[in-house]
Amino acid sequence: MTLGLTHFEAALLFALFASVVLGVVTKKTDRERLRYGIRCFVYFMVALFAIGWLMWLGHR
Amino acid sequence: MPAKSDAGGTPVGMLSKVMLVAWLVPGGGHLLLKRSLRGAILMGTIVLMFVLGLLMRGVMFHPQRADLLTTVITYGGFLGDLANGVLYILAFIFGYTDKVVDVAGHVHDYGTKFLVAAGLLNILAMIDAFEIAKGKKD
C-alpha cells in the first residue's frame, strides 16, 4: 500500500508535524508553546504559498 | 563514593539514561522525566510522521563515499534516519531499508523527507529532554 498525497497535502502535513514539535520543545509555558507552534505553522504556510507562486511564475 | 555528576549537579548516569531513552523512543526522555503530556505529543507526532514516510515508500539513506555533495547528502540522510531510534531499528530488521529503492515521483520524495525529518525532530526532542534533565528548563 502506498499513500497517495498531493504536493500540498504532503507539505501541509510536514508543516503541521514540524510546527507541533517546534512548539513543544521551545518556550517555557504552555501558552507560549501553543503560540509559537501556531506561528511556525503560519510561517510554513506563507513560505509554501509564496514559493509555490514563485515557481508558477518561473515556469510561465 | 558519590556518583559522578556534571557541573550542574545532575548524575552523568541519569543524563546518559535520559539521552539513550530519548533517542530510542521518541518522546521517551520526556516520559522518563515525568513530562507525560509533552512526551506523548512528541511521541505521537514523530511516530506518525515516520509511519507516513513509510506509507509513502520513502527511501532510507545508505552512507556512500563519492563526490562531496553525494557524501554529505547520504551521510546526513543516514544520520537523520538513524535518529529515529527504535523505529529505524525495526525498519532495518524487517528489511525496509534495503527493500525500498529510489523511484521518481513526488510522493516517494516526500516520504524520504518525512523519514529524515522525523529523525531530526527526534534530535530536537532529545536536546529538550537533556536540558530538562540538567535543570536548565522546566
Image (tube, rainbow, N blue to C red):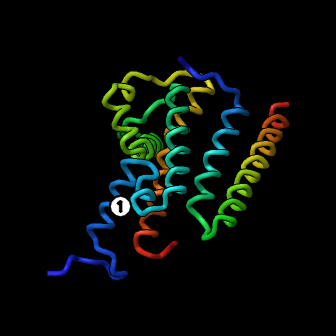
Residue drawn where x is 63% and y is 41% of the image? A14
Q: Mark 1 points at which residue?
A: B18
**Residue B124: image x %, image y %?**
50, 57
Give the position of the N terminus of chain B as an image quadrant.
Answer: bottom left
Three-letter code for the amino acid on which mark 1 is drawn: Val
Above or below for A40 versus A9: below
Question: Looking at the picture, does residue B72 appear above or below residue A39?
Answer: above
Q: Is mark 1 on a helix, strand or loop?
A: helix
The count of marks equals 1
The chain carrying label 1 is B
Residue visible at 53% across and 44% down? B44
Q: Nearer the viewer, residue B70 or B33?
A: B33
Coordinates of residue B111 in the picture (x, y in percent): 55, 32
Give x and y (percent) for residue A40.
70, 55
Residue at point 68%, 56% (across, down): A37
Height in image: A40 above or below A15? below
